[in-house]
Image: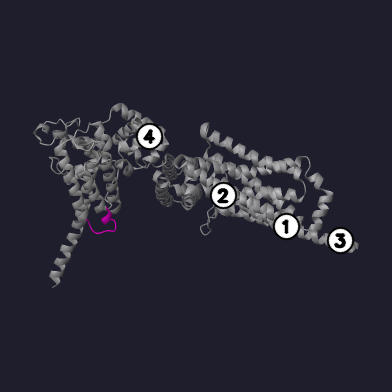
Amino acid sequence: MRTLLLRLATVLLALVPAAAIAESSDVQTAWRLLDYMAVDYGGAVQAGRVKNVSEYAEMNEFAAAVAARLRSLPAKPEQQALVQGSAKLQALIVHKGSPEQVAMIARGLAADLLRAYPVPLAPDKAPDIASGSALFKQNCAACHGMKGDGHGPDAAKLSTPPIAFTDAARARQRSVFALYQVVTQGLDGTAMQSFADMPNDQRWAVAFHAGQFAFTDAQVREGERLWKSDTSLRQRIPDLKALVALTPAALAGSIGDAKANAVMAYLRRHPEAVMPQAPASLAAARAKLAASLEAARRGDARGARELALSAYLDGFEPVEPTLTARDATLMGRIEGAMGEYRAAVDRGDSPDALTERVSALGNLFDAAEAVLAPDAATQTSTFLGAFTILLREGLEALLIVVAMIAFLRKAERGEELRYVHGGWISAIVAGALTWAVATYVIGISGASRELTEGFGSIFAAVVLLSVGIWMHGKAQADQWQRYIREKMSRALGGGSGWFLFGLAFVVVYREVFETILFYAALSAQSDNAMLLAGAGFAIGVLGMIAWAMLRYSRKLPIAQFFRYSAWLMAVLTVVLAGKGVAALQEAGLVDIAPLSDVPRLSMLGVFPTWQSLLAQLLMAVAVALGFAWNRRSEARSASGQVAAR
């Protein structure tokens, strides 16, 4: 009994893959026949009349074979619709329907078939075209000819003439996938045999080689120019799956015949062009980290540190905006790991320890390359990326500018609003100029970006510290009224207006500077319509927040307004201090001492390093001391007033 069960299990295990292979074969054969009918039916029937009797009989035979194979497939909810579609196709052919109708139904049925019964549609890697040429010469040229014109030495012996791959009209309707199916399955009723025993990558290589005969060298050169200059083409054909399924005729529907033929001529000779490429900057980061590791092994600590810093600024920094938009968590992990590697170099860690860190970074870069691949950018990810970037970067600046506007309105100094509005408007104009310079003139280095963010944040934090302490000191209504009577005119006169202008400019430009770099990176690889939609939605949300803050601030008693504003300024001071030091660390201006148990909360300016946390702690202590001094001064003033009475 035990032996019998073992034998039965062995038989069942053998049958499972056989069934799967049979199903895949039926699906592929049905798909191939449908594709063949879509292309060749026009040679059998024209204007409702049979044009070629033998080809018309073949079309009826193929339609019946498709119906039979669809009925034999494993039961699925979609199977019945496929069978009905095949019956409709059979009836249309029997009634000599138009080639356009047959092609439409056949292609639709083929697409529905693959959705219901998925089979491999593309090679795993870019085919080796040189290998495909050699294989074609060895296995196909005898019938199809060395030039693919159907005039090989054995062609005259065949009852059915071999396909001429140089036929431009046929080639426009034929996908590489269809050629691959013919190579794999053969063609019933002809001398075209199956090459299913040939390795899969070789079959793809032969299919690509066969698919390029109808195009000229001049078309290949023009296609290369178009492919490299037109980003929209790379979005239309983002990978091998899209390429092998696409016919020149289908592509021509969106870009025209001449361009479609040229682009397909180039890509069929150079399929590697559609493979996701690792960003050059990430490749540079890997190379510089390897060089840094080698310098550390030689005992060159300074060289190792400089190369590690360059790996971040020149390698990772250029892709940081796009990666942040698509996977902010991964971006934070890489940024933190690169900082920890620099810190390890500074500590003089052993080469083995540094090697482990570089290996871990290599794995993170692999993940980043997958996230940054062109096909990873969906419309939803583009919209969400554009929305969250602008909302995150704009919120800090909005809170500060709105607080300044509300303060001036409370002080009844509306004439000074022009300085605040002038500041933030100038910052946006300066941001647009920065974008133009970064895009068309000199570009912006990673170090320049980090230094701009770092010093801008530190400046804003220091200013907000003084403003927050000052507002806290005026949180009592009598203090504010006395201040209005005694000093308001002088405080907001002359140079103070320009101080407001400068503060508004700095806090807004810092965020605009960051945002334009993010958006420039997103626009290069994404749907710009969705990018603008995300930005517009974020602007709408920021506008509602500003409106709500200004409306609510009008109703607040003066003491509460100043108390809340003071605490807002205090929180932003601590946040900006952490962000500023972190940016200066990334620029290599401040050392990095990592903390393993501290989470990274970039929205709050919290980064896992001693230096950034110490800066935040010092700002928090300064705020606490300032607020304590205000309370003590208020108590002394109150006791003096009581004594005077």
On the image, the x and y values in percent for residue 306 come to 50, 41
Residue 460 visible (yes or no): yes
Q: Real-space Cα distance between discs 4 and 3?
A: 84 Å
Measured along the vertical axis of the image, is residue 166 above or below residue 452? Answer: above
Which residue is disc 1 drawn over? 556
Residue 622 visible (yes or no): no
Q: Nearer the viewer, mark 3 or mark 2?
A: 2
**Which residue type does callout 2 highlight?**
Leu
What range of the chain is rendered magenta?
73-81
Which SS class for mark 3?
helix
First in residue order: circle 2 vs circle 4 = 4
Residue drawn where x is 68% and y is 52% of the image: 550
Asked if residue 551 lies left or right of residue 453, the reply is right
First in residue order: circle 1 vs circle 2 = 2
First in residue order: circle 3 vs circle 2 = 2
On the image, the x and y values in percent for residue 540 come to 58, 48
